[in-house]
């Protein structure tokens, strides 16, 4: 298995633009998590899905953030409109029930 | 919800010495405690984990101890090597499909 796959690896955009981050979880994993990592706040959970259903999105900072999981093999995290304070590394991770959590390579987002 | 505190935030040791990183958690229902290692520019990777029915677990130079009564767990690295230099994160969860809550990380530097 290729592991959790995220794209793009790097994204540079201007303030106000829409940003879409993509994730393909490990096949067979039924839970998917989106984390954001910054120096100041560490690894923060944004939202997670069980069996493609969003369970808890209380970590999503604002209404500008949204996430979807239309099927078991794909999820997106969208920021619209983006702001400079959204600059961070965004990680997607997946696991099966009671099993180990695996991270993708992350998307380094820079909003100018 | 769960809150995980991690100390110290930075740690420097001489090559060959031992390193200890400590974490406390708040939710007595938590029963799964993994440790992740993150090298610069890379994804967090699981290095060892422990469940609440075990007090200690070892894997070569790495060991983790858990004290459920005191709600704290620790990572021990013996005979440190320069390649152990990284940021280490502890985490806790109530297993199942609930998300991991991470500590803020410890930046370990092993000086040759």
Image (spheres, coloured by chain):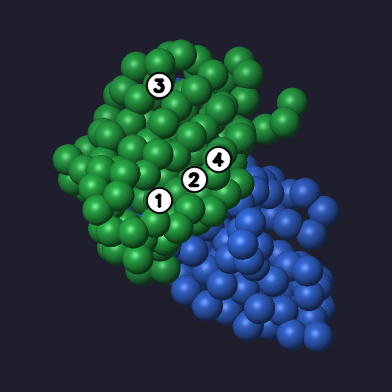
Chain colours: A green, B blue
Residue A87 percent across, percent down from the top left:
37, 60
Q: Chain of mark 2?
A: A
C-alpha separation, residue under disc 3 versus residue under disc 1: 18 Å
C-alpha separation, residue under disc 2 versus residue under disc 4: 10 Å
C-alpha separation, residue under disc 3 versus residue under disc 4: 15 Å
Name the N-terminal-most of marks 2 and 1.
1
C-alpha separation, residue under disc 2 versus residue under disc 3: 15 Å
Q: Residue at x 73, y 67 (%)?
A: B84
Residue A54 percent across, percent down from the top left:
31, 23
Name the N-terminal-most of marks 2 and 3.
3
Residue mark closest to the camera, 2 vs 4: 4
Residue with the mark numbered 4: A7
Residue with the mark numbered 1: A36
Residue B62 against residue B92 in the figure, above or below: below
Residue B21 against residue A104 in the figure, above or below: below
Residue with the mark numbered 2: A91
At mark 4, the secondary structure is: strand
Residue with the mark numbered 3: A69
At mark 2, the secondary structure is: strand
């Amino acid at each position: 298995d290729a592991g959790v796959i995220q794209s793009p690896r790097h994204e540079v955009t201007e303030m106000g633009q829409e940003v879409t981050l993509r994730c393909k979880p490990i096949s067979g994993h039924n839970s998917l998590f989106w984390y954001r990592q910054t120096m100041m706040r560490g690894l923060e959970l944004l939202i997670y899905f069980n069996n493609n259903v969003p369970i808890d999105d209380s970590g999503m900072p604002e209404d500008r953030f949204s996430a979807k999981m239309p099927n078991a093999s794909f999820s997106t995290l969208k920021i619209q409109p983006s702001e400079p304070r959204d600059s961070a590394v965004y990680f997607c991770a997946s696991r099966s029930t009671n099993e180990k959590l695996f991270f993708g390579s992350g998307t380094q987002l820079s909003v100018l | 919800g769960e809150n995980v505190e991690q100390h110290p935030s930075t740690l420097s040791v001489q090559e060959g010495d031992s390193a200890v990183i400590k974490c406390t958690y708040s939710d007595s229902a938590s029963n799964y405690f993994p440790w992740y290692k993150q090298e610069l520019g890379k994804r967090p990777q699981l290095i060892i984990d422990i469940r609440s029915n075990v007090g200690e677990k070892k894997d070569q130079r790495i060991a983790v101890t858990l004290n459920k009564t005191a709600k704290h767990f620790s990572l021990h690295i013996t005979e440190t090597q320069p390649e152990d230099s990284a940021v280490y994160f502890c985490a806790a969860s109530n297993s199942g499909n609930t998300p991991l809550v991470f500590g803020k990380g410890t930046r370990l530097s092993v000086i040759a």
